[in-house]
Image (tube, coloured by chain):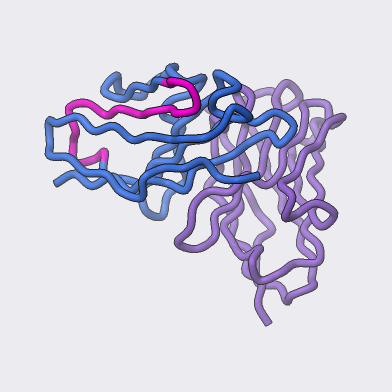
Chain colours: A purple, B blue
Amino acid sequence: EVQLVESGGGLVQPGGSLRLSCAASGFTLSSNWMSWVRQAPGKGLEWVANIKYDGTEKYYVDSVKGRFTISRDNAKNSLFLQLSSLRAEDTAVYYCTRDISPGTMGYWGQGTLVTVSS
Amino acid sequence: QSALTQPPSASGSPGQSVTISCTGTSSDVGGYDYVSWYQQHPGKAPKLMIYDVTTRPSGVPDRFSGSKSGNTASLTVSGLQAEDEADYYCGSFAGSNPVRFGGGTKLTVL
């Protein structure tokens, strides 16, 4: 059974940093593109970033370029998202997803809440 | 990186059919056969219902179907059931800006 378990969310001040982790199981992480998708409270889905199975390609939504970094450790079955220079508008539930087709999030974790507030 | 356009709401009675549209451009929906649809119940993570325009993942009822014409994709839910009441989001591959989502449609079963 595919499982994705996010962790690392919490309350952080504007300008602060946070590192999100996603523990993957039930499939071979090294064979899959992976993504992070976020959802602000009461709002829709927003794709944030994705990373190729070997980590050689990474893409970001314009609003987080230069502030967020996606990475992976296939040996540890883990996906990461480093969040820096955080703003109030980054407040959201962040989901880790396994991509099954270009632009398709086939499996989702339960999400981790990031709140940016002073 | 503009979002895809969905109607904010849709509704139907049990047993009826309802169709939700998702309009993009030739850079996303119209340019690739990689349109997906997600169902989200309150407080839950999204669930993939349709991908590659028309493909249903294992376990998704065949009451759910997808299609595309030009820059507009559609999700049709036939034989509406109470448990289909949820938010639905479309998504599309968009090349070098890989993924765009629609704003979401709240489906109400009357």
**Relative height, residue A43 to residue B76 (above, below):** below
- Can you see residue A65? yes
Q: Does residue B73 belong to the magenta stretch?
A: yes
What is the quadrant of the C terminus of chain A in the image? bottom right
Q: What segment is highlighted magenta in the picture?
A: B68-84
Q: Residue at x 27, y 44 (%)?
A: B10
**Relative height, residue A100 to residue A112 (above, below):** above
Q: Residue at x 33, y 35 (%)?
A: B20
Residue B70: give x, y in percent of width and height: 48, 22
Residue A35: give x, y in percent of width and height: 67, 38
Q: Residue at x 76, y 34 (%)?
A: A51
In the image: residue B103, left or right of residue B107? right
Q: Quadrant of residue A17?
A: bottom right
Choose between B49 and A1: the one closer to the eye: B49
**Relative height, residue A50 to residue A15 (above, below):** above
Q: Does residue A39 belong to the magenta stretch?
A: no
Residue B76: give x, y in percent of width and height: 30, 27
